[in-house]
Amino acid sequence: MALLLCLETATRNCSVALVREGQVIALREKAEEGYTHAEKLHVFIEEVLQEAGVLASDLDAVAVSKGPGSYTGLRIGVSAAKGLCYALQIPLISVSTLQILTHATSVNEGYIIPLIDARRMEVYTAVFDTHGNPLSAEEAMILNETSFEAWQGPCTFVGDCLPKAKTVLTHPRFQFLESVVFPSAQTMADLAETLYHEKQFEDVAYFEPFYLKNFMINP
């Protein structure tokens, strides 16, 4: 039975799950206003291993959220994942952060549209069908009243910036989850499991996060 360690650090949520055959057997996560991933990630990893009574050497692979998302968060998560894979000589799996968000909701018709906060009115987003299959490229988008107007039919939005999205996405066919949702290692379990059995692994030496847009420092 495959034993996977899943790391999700693309947003304010620092999340770690231990997964056996697609089932989460231990979970630690916390979303805070400030990014505390550097302090919490390795602690959470140790805690889930201890809770499940397994050693790091028992892991079959490490899965990490590859982005888009926070530059700092992604760097911390990917660095940790690559370090473990290199030390343990096990495969590295990467999962789209936006696709992880699609697994946080279930709808029967229309589209699922994850939104990750990229500051001000900008979001990272893409459009998925009800099975979580991508229908558009992932992009950084500045939201306005005409966003997603080309997608006819019910659109269900999920993510960490729904309050600001609601101020401009007001069409009656737009639906929002009742609460803010962060990407979680818990909801990446099935995706990671599938990629593991399909042997879709990354090159540990050369893999980099999917930042989507260039890093900029405000003067």
Image: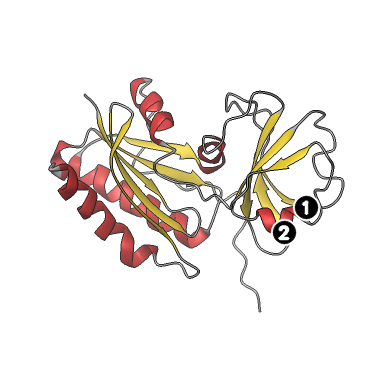
Residue 167: x percent and y percent? Answer: 79, 57
| Residue ID at (32%, 58%) | 41
Badge 2 element: helix
Disc sitting over residue 143 in the figure: 1
Q: To which residue does mark 2 refer?
A: 164
Residue nearest the observer in this picture, 86 or 118: 118
| Residue ID at (72%, 27%) | 110
- Please name the amino acid that badge 2 sits on: Lys
Marks counted in the figure total: 2
Q: Earlier in the sequence, mark 2 or mark 1?
A: 1
Residue 36: x percent and y percent? Answer: 40, 67
Task: Give the left or right position of residue 103, taking residue 126 as reference.
Answer: left
Tell us which disc is closer to us: 2 or 1: 2
Residue 207 appears in the figure: no
| Residue ID at (44%, 46%) | 184
Query: To which quarter of the image does residue 40 belong?
Result: bottom left
- Residue contact between numbered discs 2 and 1, judged by CB atoms under 8 Å: yes
Residue 85: x percent and y percent? Answer: 26, 42
Residue 131: x percent and y percent? Answer: 58, 23
Specify the quadrant that holds the N terminus.
top left
Disc sitting over residue 105 in the figure: none
Gap between marks 2 and 1, in whole Å? 9 Å
Residue nearest the observer in this picture, 101 or 10: 101
Q: In the rendered view, would you say 74 is above or below 23?
A: below
Q: In the rendered view, would you say 170 is above or below 35?
A: above
Residue 56 appears in the figure: yes
Badge 1 element: loop
Task: Give the left or right position of residue 41, taking residue 113 as reference.
Answer: left
Q: Residues within 10 Å of mark 2 (few under 14, many from 20)?
A: some
Q: In the rendered view, would you say 90 is above or below 43?
A: above
Extreme residue in the front direction? 178
